[in-house]
Image: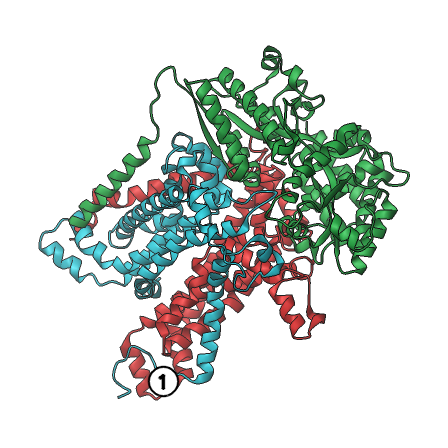
Amino acid sequence: MKKCMALITALVLLLSLGLTSASALAEEQVTLKFWHIWPTDRMAQIVDDYIAIYEAEHPNIHIEPSAYQEVDYQTQKLPIACSTKSQGDVFFCWGGGAAKTYVDAGAVLKLDDYLAKYNVYDDILEGTLTYGTYDGGVYGLPLKQWAGVLFCNQELFDEYGVAIPTTWDEMMTAVETFRANGVTPLVLGAKDAWHIGMIQNALAVRTAGPDYVNAALSGEATMNTEEIVRSAQLLVDLNNAGAFCNGTLGVSSEEAQEEFYMGMVAMYFGGSWCASGCDSPDNDLVGKVTVAPLPVVEGGKGDETTYSGGVIDFMMVNAATEHPDEAFDFALGMTKYMSQECYKIGDSLPAWKLGEIDEAEVSPTLIAIKDLIQNSTGYVLAWDTFLAGAAIDAHYQALQGLIAGTMTPEEFAVAMDEAVVAMYAQD
Amino acid sequence: MKMKANKNLLKTRTSPVMTVFLVLVALIQLFPLYWMFMFSLKDNKEIFGANPMGLPRAWQWGNYSKIFTAGNMGLYLLNSVIVTASTILLTLLLSAMATYAIVRMKWKLSKLVYNIFLVGMMLSVQAVMLPLYINLQPILSTHWALILPYVAFAMPQAILLMVGSLEALPKEMEEAAFIDGANIYRLFYVIILPMLAPILSTVAILTFLSSWNEYMLALVFISTDKLKTVTVGVNDMVGKYSTKWGVVGAGLTVATLPTLIMYALLSKNITNSLAMGAVKG
Amino acid sequence: MERALRDKKAILFFVLPALIWFVAIALLPVLQSVRYSLLKWDGITQGKYVGLANYTELLGDGLFWNALWHSLILAGASVFIQLPISMLLAMILVNGVKGETLYRNIFFVPVIISSSVIANLWMKVYHPSYGLLNTLLGNLGLTAWQHEWLGSTDSALIACFVPMVWQYIGYHMLLYYSSAKAISEDILEAARVDGANKRQMVFSIIIPQIVPMIKASVIFAIIGSLKSFDMIQILTKGGPVHASEVPSLMMYINIFTTRRYGYASAIAIFIIVECLVFTLLVQRVFGRWQND
C-alpha cells in the first residue's frame, strides 16, 4: 500500500508541475513570443542585449525568446508550427521559397501598412525587400545580406606562387598547381548538396547573368539553356581536375570547411558569413585571407560585379498574434539592431542604412567583402532558398548527380527546367 | 562435482584464445565511450583531421565549464529528468495494469486489445508528428507535450514484455490472496506489482533510453527555452556555419552519463527479467 | 475468484487508462495519416482529395522501390549477420567465462549511446583522408583497398549498414543470454547425464529452448530495419544520389523538404502495413518450426 501511495503522490506532483507553467498574466501586460535561430555565442548575446533594451523601454511588454538550431528549426519546427499558426508572435524565417507556403497559408502578417506608418522605406537599403514580398505585399523585415565570394588563403597562394584568379583559366591553373603540390584547392562538402549549389549557383551567375537566372528561377524563362549547362560543366571540370577533397560526396560541409579554417585548403567559395570564421582567433587564418569575386568566365553574361547572394533572412510577424502592433514594433527594433551588430561581428552585411560604426570594431574580412560589393550590379539568391518544395530536392539530387558522375550537365539543365516548371504549374 | 546444479551451464576453463577474443570485442564495444569522452576534450583542429581518434594533445577541460556557463545545461538536464521520470512511472503503471487485465482476467476482447497495442511497435514518430502536434495544441507549453506521446509510444513494447513475463508466473499466490478475501485492486498492488519487479526494471531502462535520447518531438513540441530537454540543448550548440565541436562533445558526454548510471543500476535486473518475459512470449 | 476475474468494472479500471491513452495519442494520428494519405497536401495550406493517387504513384516510383530494397537488405543483414553474432557472443558467455557479467555489461554499451554519437564516430572512421579505416589500410600497405566509403555510390549503403548492425549486437545478445540463463536446471542436468558436449548442449538443448526469444528478436530486428532512419540521416542523408536511401528517409524528405505531406503519409502507412506483414510472416515461419 505504501508503494501505491508513493506512486499516486508522485503522479499528483507531476500533474501540478505541468499545469503551473501556464501562468496567468496581469491585464495590461503584453507577452510576445520571439522564435529565433541563435541559441549560443555572440549572436545569442546580441539578441539578449536587445531584448533587455526593449523591455527597459517598454515596461509593459515582456519578450519570451526561444532559440533553436537553425537547420532543424527551418526544416522541422517551423513548418509544423505554421500549420496551426502557433509559431512565435515574431519569428525568424527565410523569405523566397521557404516562407511562400506560410504566406499562402495565411500564417504571416502582411506588413505594408506598418512599413508606411513607421517610414521604414527611408532606413532600408534598396532591393532588400524583394524576397520578403509575395503578390505585391511585404511580409518580412530584412535582417541581413550575404554575398558569395572566393576566400583565398594568401599564405598558400604565396607559398606556391599562385596569383588570386580573376579569370576561369587562371582558376583552373590555380587548381592544378595546388593539386600538383598535394594541397586541396577548393572546399566542398558534397554530402550537403547546398554546399555544391553554392559553387554551381555562382557559376550560373557568371555564365547566364543575374537577370536571366532570376527570371529562370521565377519560372519566366527556361532553365534548359546553354549557359546553365555550362555552369554545370564548369563545376564538373573543377571536380575532374581534382579541385575538391577526396571522397567529397561523403564529407559534410562542416568537415570540409574546417580544413579551410585550419589553413589546409587554398580556397573556399562561401557566403560572407564565413568572414567570422576567417577572423576567429580559434582558427589559423587571422590576417591570411584575401577575398575576391568568383573569377569571370569567358563569354559569360555576368561580369565580376555580379554575385550570388542577396537578402533571404527575414523577421516576420505571426498573422495569428494577439498583439500585432507591439509585435511589429519589437520586430522592427530587433531587426535594425541585429543588422548593425551582426555586421560588427562579421556575421553578415547589413540590410539597413547604418548609423555611425567604428570600422575598427568590424571583422576585417567582412569589410573587405563590403568594399568588394560596393559597386555590385546584380544578385541571385541560392537556388535552394529561391525555390520551394520538390524543386529543392530535385536541385540537390541533380547537383550530387553532377559530382557523382551519374548526371551530365545537359541532364542537369533538363532536370532543373522540369523541376521549376512543375513548381510554378502547381499554383 | 560436475553434476551439481551450477550457475553456468557448462563449467569450463576459459582458453587464452577465447580470452583474447572477448577482450578484443570488449574493447571495440567500449570504443564509442572512449571516443566520445576524448572528443569532448579537443578543439576543432584535433577533431577534424589532426587527431580524430587519439588522446587529446591539449586537454580542453574548459569545454565542460562552457556548457554549464554558456548553455542552460543544468535546466535542460532537470527537464529531461522530469519528463523521463514521469514517462517511466506512467508507462510502468499503465502497462502493468493493462497487462494484468490481458493476461489474468477473463473477457472476450483481451486478445484484440493486446494486438491493438502491438501495432504500436510499428509506428514511427515522424509519421505521426504533424497530427499529434495538432491534437496536442492545448498542452504544448508544458512537460505533458512530451510525456503523453513518450508514454504512448513506450507502452507497446512494455506490454509485450510484461505479458510474456506474467504468463510465465505461477498463479498460486493470487489464488491464496483471493481466498484470504483480498479484492482485485489490492491484489494487483500487493501481489502482482512486486512479482513483476524484474521485468519492470527492464522496461524502465528501455523506456529511459528511448525517451532520454528522443530529439524530434522534443524539438518540435517544446517552444519555451525553460522547458527544453537535454538533446535539444546539446544540438543547439551546432551552428550552421561555425561550431565548437568539443563543446558539443562535452554536452553529449554529460547527457550520456545519466544513461550509464541508470544502466549500471538496473543491469542486474534486466538479465533476470528479460528471460522470464521472453521464453513464454 | 472466477467472479472477481470477470468483474467488468475491474477490467475497465485496469485496461482503460492504457488503452485510451494509447489510442488517443498513438493510434488516432495514424488514422489521421490514413486520411492525409488521400490528399495532395503540403501539410500547411488547404489539401485536395485525390483518392488513392498517392498510393498508385508510390507503387510506380522507382526511387521508392530502390529505398524499399535497401531496407530489405538491411533486414536480411540484421537477421543473418547481426543475430548470429549476437547468438555466438551469448552462447560464449552462457557457457561460463571469467568475468561473464562484466563482458555482458560492456557488450551492451553501444546500445546505450545515442545513435547520433555512434554516427559521428563512424564519420571519423570512414573519413576519406584522415579516417581510421583508410589510415589503417594505408599503414598496412593496402592503399589499393582505400576507398571513399560514404562518398561513392557502390559502398555508401554497406558503409551505413555496418554501424547499424554493429550497434545493436549487444541488445540481441542480452535477449539470448538472459533467456538461456532462465532455462530450467533440470533440463540441462538431464542433458549432461546423457553425456552431451558443449556443442551439443548449445545446438540441441539451449537454442531449441529459447526459440520464442529468437522469434521475438527476429521481429524486433526486422521492424527496426524497416523503420531505420537516424543513423543513415547523419551518415549520408540517403546519398550519394539515392545510393543509401531507405523508406523512412524518403518519408522524412517528403514531409520536410519537398513538403508532399500526402505522399509522405502514404509511405508511412506502407511501412506500418509492411511491418505487420513481416511480423505475421515471422510468426508463421516460427510456428511451423516450433511444431516440427
Q: Is residue A227 visible?
A: yes
Q: Which chain is red?
A: C
**Chain A, which colour?**
green
The residue at the point 43 percent across, 43 percent down is: B69
Q: Position of residue B4 (x, y in %)?
A: 25, 84
Q: Is residue A226 left or right of residue C147?
A: right
Q: Is residue B214 visible?
A: no
Q: Residues within 10 Å of mark 1 (few under 14, many from 20)?
A: few
| Direction left: furthest residue | B180
The residue at the point 29 percent across, 82 percent down is: C189
Residue B135 falls in image quadrant: top left
- Establish if B167 lies above or below A254: below
The residue at the point 46 percent across, 54 percent down is: B61
Q: Position of residue B154 (x, y in %)?
A: 38, 49
Q: Position of residue A1 (x, y in %)?
A: 15, 49
Secondary structure at badge 1 equals loop
Instruction: Indicate the amino acid at tag 1.
Output: Thr
Q: Position of residue C225 (x, y in %)?
A: 52, 57
| Direction right: furthest residue | A299
Considering the image in quadrants, where does the C terminus of chain A appear? top right
Residue C146 falls in image quadrant: bottom right
Could you say which is closer to the camera, residue B253 or residue B55?
B55
Q: Which chain is cyan?
A: B
> Would you name the residue on which mark 1 appears?
B12
Residue C112 falls in image quadrant: bottom left
- Chain that bears disc 1: B
Which color scheme did the rendering employ for the protein? by chain
